[in-house]
Image: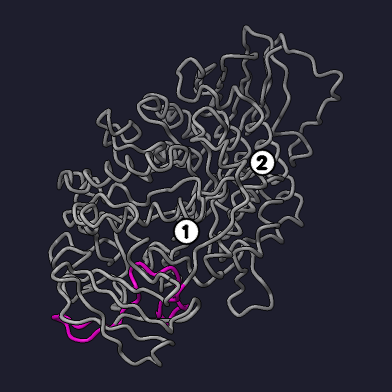
Amino acid sequence: MNKQDFYIGKAFDAYTYFGAHPTADGVVFRTYAPQAQKIAVIGDFTDWHEEEMTQDGLSGIWSLLNGNAKVGQKYKYVVYGANGRVEHCDPYGFGMELRPDFASVIRDLSFEFSDEEWMKKRSRNFGDPMNIYEIHFGSWKHKTDAKDGWYEYDELADDLIEYCHRHHFTHVEFMPLNEYPFDGSWGYQSTGYFSPTSRYGTARQLQTLIDRLHKANIGAIIDFVPAHFATDSYGLKRFDGSELYEYPASDVGNSEWGTCNFIYSRYEVCSFLQSAANYWLTEYHFDGIRMDAVSRLIYWMGDENRGVNPRSIEFIKRMNAGLHTLHPTAMLIAEDSTAYPNVTKPVDQDGLGFDYKWDLGWMNDTLDYIMKTSEERKSLSERLTFSMYYYYNERYLLPLSHDEVVHGKRTIVDKIYGNYEEKFAQARVLYMYMMMHPGKKLNFMGNEIGMFREWDEEKEPDWFLLKYPMHDSFNKYMQELGRIYTSTPQLYEWDDDNQGFEWLTINENGNNVFGIKRSCGEGKPVAALFNFSDQKGHHHDKDKWVVTLNSDWEEFSGSTKRPPADINVPSTDGFDLAPFSALYLVME
């Protein structure tokens, strides 16, 4: 690490200097605490007696070499500052104890990856399919013989790979895997930005999981929280006795979640966050970072009325530009609900430098539409069409994420208006519409089996539902949609080219029937018709199309018998659509 870069907010490798680093002579401990009066290390290797660190002049950098310390041992920093004596975990520590304990753990990050082929061909997927499976690692599957039910990182590799292949998921997005004290925060309130949570094992086990995913041609994305951090006294809060990482007490000091907001006018904080993002990409080979709560960085407290935060905009641009220089094929994804412009334009074109932005407008409008009755939908066609008015302003990802299936919002299928059978029929239409709409795709675990119970981080999805025909057939339908999407270039190659999209029909005479045609540079176009009405629908088209998937086929718990393949002839009289059904069409 170049110390000057650290002080001016340009370091991306601060973790290679700070933290606990094994050497031939022992372990070197370094931390940054400019306002501390004294700092000591305590740990297994000192019998938990204080061993004082030395500050390098007035640099704020404290260090200690301990010849007895070894990999796997626990340690803490004892910081003496304006708030007295406080024991802290290491801000740059590579491992931590399981909550409620908080000692850091000395880790050796060296790992021999065997994913060279994947890393060589990896890209940001602009012209490729991305069907992302978002999971909370600790609740995707539970052990019956473990206290908390948790599997370790590498233990789930086989199951996760097989499941992704069966459903044609191209990437797994992990909700935060950094260390955090409160299970109910899901990892979004962190105390260890460089520590994979010990709930599921060690750094090496996580490296093994990512390596296994890559060898199975599955990408890995990690959620990262650059906006705020946990307030626990042993974490970053008042680390050196002063507000080092956070704002001084003010109306911008605490987030809506009660956490501390990072202060981006301190360049050492920027170096800390940039280095953390780089750490996950470098040491674990993650293929992308999804930045959480970007709106809270763009605007003061996420409130457009309070204006743009210029220092955080500067930080975002510097971080994204630097990460793209270091990792040209890694993806940077913004969870941003604002209309702030140029989020996915390169920094050298005055953009924020992200590769993708979550299309939360599409998500909100679409879910609002399916919650309405068939009669109400007749006058709400703009809920489904408005997204295409702004779509080409950014590069978008369509999310149906964990945020939409918690806190009383109900699950995706349960939001839909209608009885049990009608909900599933419309869910099949909804997901075909999602796959036909331009943009990368993301679904949270449980969406694919038609969950009715909201997600709970202490429980795995209701896999037993697959014993019931409605849920099992819905899951098979989702697998078929995934197969079609990932194997059909017309559905992804021209996502960012308006020549690749066309409306075939939009709610003619209030019939709630919509049609989309997709195309790319090669091959004939494909299309889909969606009937969001409880009445039969019809569409006549000048082109000749062949139906290759009908959401109302009996095998998907619909009422239409699937025709034999040898009589699957083009329609010249148009298409009749059953109530709440969708047709996927291939041009003759």
How far apart marks 2 and 1 lie (CA) works out to 25 Å
Q: Which secondary structure type mostly characterizes the magenta part of the structure?
A: loop
Quadrant of the image for the C terminus? top right
Where does residue 559 sit, x and y in percent of width and height? Answer: 76, 35
For image coordinates 43% across by 81% down, the residue present is 69
Where does residue 518 sit, x and y in percent of width and height? Answer: 56, 20
Instruction: Please state which amino acid type lies under the numbered disc 1.
Output: Val
Instruction: Tell me the residue that label 2 is attached to.
Output: 168
- Name the one closer to the observer, 47 or 139: 47
Q: How is the image coloured?
A: one colour
Residue 441 disc label = none
Where does residue 31 sit, x and y in percent of width and height? Answer: 28, 70
> In the figure, residue 516 lies in which quadrant?
top right
Residue placed farthest to the top in the image? 542
Q: Is residue 113 above or below residue 42?
A: above
Quadrant of the image for the N terminus? bottom left
Stretch of the chain drawn in magenta: 78-106
Instruction: Please state which amino acid type lies under the numbered disc 2.
Output: His
Residue 406 disc label = 1
Query: Which of pointers 2 and 1 lies earlier in the amino acid sequence?
Result: 2
